[in-house]
């Protein structure tokens, strides 16, 4: 059953992950069945929604914007119950979180300033053998374990 996420307003400041990058991401991850998945800077929730469709045990969405967080909750709750939505700053969530995740995906704004802190805290919130994926512009370079470039977008993978 196909389900489309809410259409974006043309004046929106969101920059959702493209379909090409999303497909590539999940092809690389391959099997996420029964994993705990964290979607930071969730925006429309498309990445976490895809994780649920592919069998994640639980998805936690973190989106600072209250309206967007509410929209994620409304959309996802129509098909799934194994999720949580937090309307909170992603760094604050990571600092206060006591749970571990198998996969953490972060897609901060391209002009984001706290990449180093985001990477550090994300790795602390990963289970052993977990994966942190950072989506960013091609002109940023991070010392990850794997990089995949799609036009102006890069996915950098950090393995724990």
Image (tube, rainbow, N blue to C red):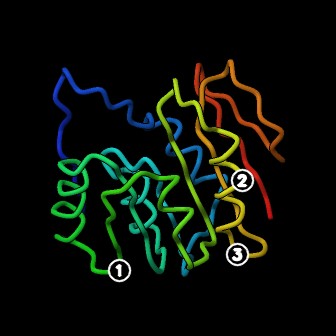
**Which mark is in front, 3 or 2?**
2
Disc 2, SS? helix
Q: Which residue is mark 1?
A: 82
**Which mark is in front, 2 or 1?**
2
First in sequence: mark 2 vs mark 1: 1
x and y percent of residue 103 in the render? 61, 65
Measured in 3D between alpha carbons, the distance from the residue under mark 3 to the one under mark 1, in whole angstroms, is: 19 Å
Q: Residue at x 59, y 43 (%)?
A: 24
17 lies above or below 55 = above
Label 2 packing within 10 angstroms: few (<14), some (14-19), many (20+): few
- Checking the image for residue 61, the label placed there is none
- State which quadrant residue 18 falls in: top left
Q: Residue at x 69, y 49 (%)?
A: 119
Q: Which residue is mark 2?
A: 120
Measured in 3D between alpha carbons, the distance from the residue under mark 3 to the one under mark 2, in whole angstroms, is: 14 Å
Is 49 displayed left or right of 4 in the figure? right
Along the line of sight, which residue is nearer the eye, 8 or 121?
121
Disc 3, SS? strand
x and y percent of residue 117 in the render? 66, 46
């Amino acid at each position: 059953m196909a389900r489309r996420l809410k259409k974006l307003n043309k004046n929106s400041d969101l920059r959702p992950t493209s379909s090409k990058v999303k497909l590539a991401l999940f092809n690389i991850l391959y099997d996420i069945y029964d994993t705990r998945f964290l979607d930071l800077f969730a925006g429309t929730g498309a990445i976490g929604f895809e994780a649920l469709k592919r069998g994640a045990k639980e998805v936690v969405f973190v989106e600072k914007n209250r309206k967007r967080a509410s929209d994620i909750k409304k959309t996802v709750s129509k098909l799934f119950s194994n999720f949580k939505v937090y309307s909170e700053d992603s760094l604050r969530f990571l600092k206060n979180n006591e749970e571990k995740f198998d996969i953490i995906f972060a897609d901060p704004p391209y002009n984001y300033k706290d990449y180093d802190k985001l990477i550090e805290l994300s790795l602390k919130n990963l289970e052993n053998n977990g994966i942190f994926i950072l989506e960013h512009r091609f002109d940023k370079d991070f010392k990850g374990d794997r990089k995949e470039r799609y036009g102006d977008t890069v996915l950098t993978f950090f393995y724990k």
